[in-house]
Amino acid sequence: MCSDNGRGDENMVRLLARAIAFILMMAMVADWAGRLLVGAAWAQPPAELAAGYSIAVTVTSKLPAENVPLDPLVDFDKAISAINAAGVLDPNSIEVRETGTGRVVAHSLGDGFGVSNRGRVQWVASRPDQRTYEIRFRTAAVRPVLRPRQFTPLVGVGDLVSYNAGVPRPVTMRFPARLVDLTGDGRLDLVGTLPHYYAPGGELGGIVCIPQVAAEGELEFGEMARLRYRQSAGDDQSKHFMGPYLVADVIDVNRDGHPDVIYTTTSKTTRFQPDRSIHKFVHVFLNSGRRDAGGMPEFVFDRKFPLPSNPAAADSGGHWWGPVRVVDLDGDDVLDLVVGRMFSDQADLVRDPRCYFLKNTNPRGWPMQLAPEVVIDCGCRACFLDVDGDGRRDAVGLILDPNAQTPYRGNLVTWRKNLGGKTPRFGPPRRFPGSPLKHSTFLSAVDTPRRRGLLLNDKRTHSVRFLELLGPSDQGDIRFRSHVIASRSADVVAGDQASPFPCDWDGDGDWDLVVGGGNGWPTVILNEGTDRRPRFALPRQISSEGRPIRIFMSQVFPGIRGYFHDMGYPFPSYVDWDGDKLPDLMLPNITNRVFWYRNVGTRTDPKFGPRQQVLVDGYPETSQTLKATARRLGAGSGKWNKRMLDPASPFGWRARAGFGDFNGDGLVDMVHADGRTRHSGGYAEAYALFVQYRDGEGHLRLRRDRVITHPDGKPLKCPGYITSQAIAADWDRDGLLDLICHWGPANTKCQPMFVRNIGTRTKPRFDHPRPLSLWGQPLYNLMKHGPYWAVHDIDGDGRPDLLAGCAYGNYAFYRRTAMDMPSRPTFQIGTARRLSR
C-alpha cells in the first residue's frame, strides 16, 4: 500500500515536472513570438524562416540610349504568395543583377517600401542592349524596417540626392516632436512633422518617423517612414497624416503601453482637406497595437478636443494651433494639454510667451476631461522638462535674440523655473550656460528613463540636435551633451527653399552645389567624390571678407526692422560677371535689387570681396531711392506691403535670374523678371534681357535691352503668385543659349518650360515655351514652394539634366535620357523562384 502510494507520488511528481516544463517552454515561445510581434523589427528571424528568391525582369520596350533609368513596379507580397513561400519581404536584402554578366547594379527603392512591400525598384541601364535583369531578395519572419543605405545612386526619376558620405550626415525635421520607441525594438526613434512636400509629387506634409539603428548608447538613425492612420477601427483604408502645416506630440495618452499621436494644424490645411474645421481641434489617434507592412504602428482616430480661440491668431482662423504638448504639468500624475502659438510673432520685436493650459480633470487620466483653458506665461512655443532637478517640469522656450541680425526667426532658447501652484507659474527666462542656443524656431522635450533633454531644429539647414541633459555640474551649472541627429543615408538638405546652382566650385573637375535659402545665407556643398558617384560634404556658408554672406529685406532697405517677411531667398549663380576669367557669385534675391561678389581668390580656392550692387543704366541707387522703396514697403507706418510696383528698380521681386552671353560679345548678360510689369499676385509679369557692354572708357555697364517675346510678339510670361525663374542653358545642344523657365498660374500648379532660342548667336529670339516632361508626363504641380530648377550635366554624358530644389533644400534629380523618352519603359516581371542554398 505504502509502496503503491510512493509510486503514485513519483508519477505525480513526474507529471507535474513535465507540465511545468511544457508551460515554461510555451512561455518562452510566447515571449519570443511576442517580441517579434511587438516589433522586433531589427531581430534576426530563425534560419529556417529565411530564404532567398529571384524574380526575372525583362525590359520589353526599346532603350534609346545609354544610361536610361528603369523602375519596374514590383509587388513582393504577391510574388511570395504566388509560390506559397513562407515569410515576408526583407527590403534590406533586395539586390539587382544584370543577367548574363551577373554584375550587381546599384539601385534605390521608391517611397512605397516605407509603408508596404510593393513599390518601384530603381536603377540605370548602362547600355541599351542590357535589358534582362534579376531582382534577388530574402524573406524574414517579420518585416524589418528599412536600414540606412551605404550608397544611394542617382537614378534620375525624381529621386533625391543623398550625401553618400560613408558616415552619418544630418537628417531634416522641421518640427521634431519626440524621441520615442515606435518600432518596438527598444531604441528611441525620432518622430516629428513636415509642413510641406518633402519630395516632388509626394504627400503634402505629414507625420514621420526616422528609426534609430545604432547600438545602445549611440544615436544613429535610418530611413524616414511616414505614419498613417485609419479613420475608424473598421476602416480598411490607411491614410497619410497631411498638412501643409501641422505639429504633433507622440505619447501614450491612454496608458496602454503604446505611444499615440496627437496633432494640430493651421487653417491653411482647409485648402487641401475636405474637413473645413480641422484647424479648430486637437486630434487624437490611438495606437492600435498593430503594425503596417512597413513596420510602423497603425493609428486609429479616437476623438478631438476644441482648441482655444483668440482673434489675435488671425493666421489660423482665430485659433491657436500649436505647438501641442501632452504633459503632466501640475504634478498630479495625469496628462494635461498645453497649446502654444506658432508663427504669428516670428517677425515681431518681442516673442509672445503665452500658452494655454488645459488641465485634465479626470483622475484616471483617460479619457481626458479638459477644464476651460487658462493662460500661462511660460515662453514662446514652450516645452516642459525638469531642467534643475527639483521634481517639477520647467518651461523651455524661445525669446528674441537681442543680437540677431533680424528679429525674423532670430531666437534664443531659454528656460523658466517652475514655481509650482495648481495652475503652474514660471519664473523669468534664463539662458543656458555656455554658447547661446540660437537659430532654432522649434523645440521639444525628451523625457524618458534612458535619455532626457531637448530636441532643437536649426533654421539654417532644417537639421536637428538632441541636447542630452546630464544634470548639474559641481558648480551647479546645467550641463548638456550635444548630439546631431544623423543617418548614413541622409538626403542632402541645405535649408528653407535653397535654390541650387550646380557648378565646379573649386576647379577639381566635378560638380558641386551652390545654394541659396529662405533665411538668406548662401552656402556651398562640395562634392568629394566624382560626377558619376558624388559624395558630398556638409553645407558651408560662403564668406565675404571673412564674414558669412547674408541677405534679408531689412538689411537692404532702411527703417523696416520687424518687417513681416524679413527673409532673403538668394538665388545664386557662379559666373564670370566681370570678365577676369574667374567665376563670381551673383545673388538675385527676395528684394528687387541684385547683388554680386567679385572672386578675389583663385579658380581652386575662391574668395570674395565686398558686396556690390548690379546697377542698370537709368536706375541709379542712392539713399533716397532705398528710402523710397522702404516707404512703399511700409517703413514709418508699420503697415507692411510686399511686391508692389517700384519705379526705383528695373527688376522684379523675389526672382531668379539667368546668366550667359546672349549676344556673342564675350560678356555675361542677364535675364531677369521685368520690374516694369506686375502680375495681380505682385510678382513681375514678364521677363527682360539686360546686356553688359563697355563704355567709352572701357568700364563695364548694364542696360535694359528688351522684353523677351515669342514669335507672335507677346511677352514671355512669368508664373503667377510664385517666384519667377529664368535659367540660361543650351538645352538642345545647338550652340545657342536657351531658357528654362518656371511657369504656371499658381504656386501649386507650375512646371518647368523649355524656351528654345530660334535666333542667332548675336541676335537671340525665343520660341513659344514647351513643358519639360519625365517619360512624357509634364513635371507639373510637384509641390507648393518651388521647385527651384537647375540645369547641369549631372551624369557626365554630355547632355544637360534637371535638378529640382524642394521646399526643404533637398534636391530631386531628373535624368535627360528619361526626360527625352515619350513614355516609361515597359517590363515583363517573371515568377519568383527559390535560390538554392
Image (cartoon, grey):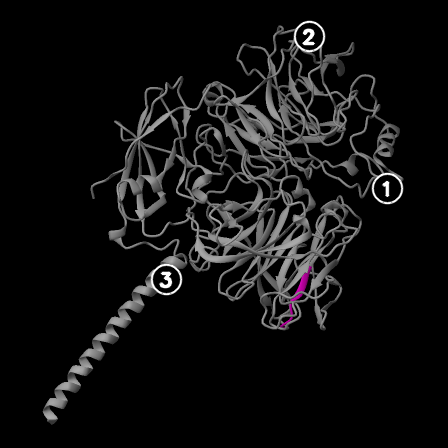
Say whether residue 442 is left or right of residue 93. Answer: right
Provide the secondary structure element on which disc 2 rests.
Answer: loop
- The disc placed on residue 638 is 1
- How much space separates mark 1 and mark 3, taking CA atoms? 62 Å
Q: Which residues are magenta?
A: 391-396
Circles 3, 2 touching at the beta carbon (< 8 Å):
no
- The residue that mark 2 highlights is 712
Provide the secondary structure element on which disc 1 rests.
Answer: loop
Circles 1, 3 touching at the beta carbon (< 8 Å):
no
Residue 324: in sight, yes or no?
Answer: yes
Q: Amino acid at mark 2?
A: Asp
Looking at the image, is 17 positioned above or below residue 75? below
Looking at the image, is 502 positioned above or below residue 808? above
- Image-quadrant location for residue 524: top right
**Mark 2, residues whose alpha carbon is within 10 Å: few (<14), some, or many (≥20)?**
few
- The disc placed on residue 34 is 3
Provide the secondary structure element on which disc 3 rests.
Answer: helix
- Image-quadrant location for residue 101: top left
Q: Position of residue 689 (x, y in %)?
A: 71, 15
Q: Indicate which disc, 3 or 2, sits on the residue closer to the N terminus.
A: 3
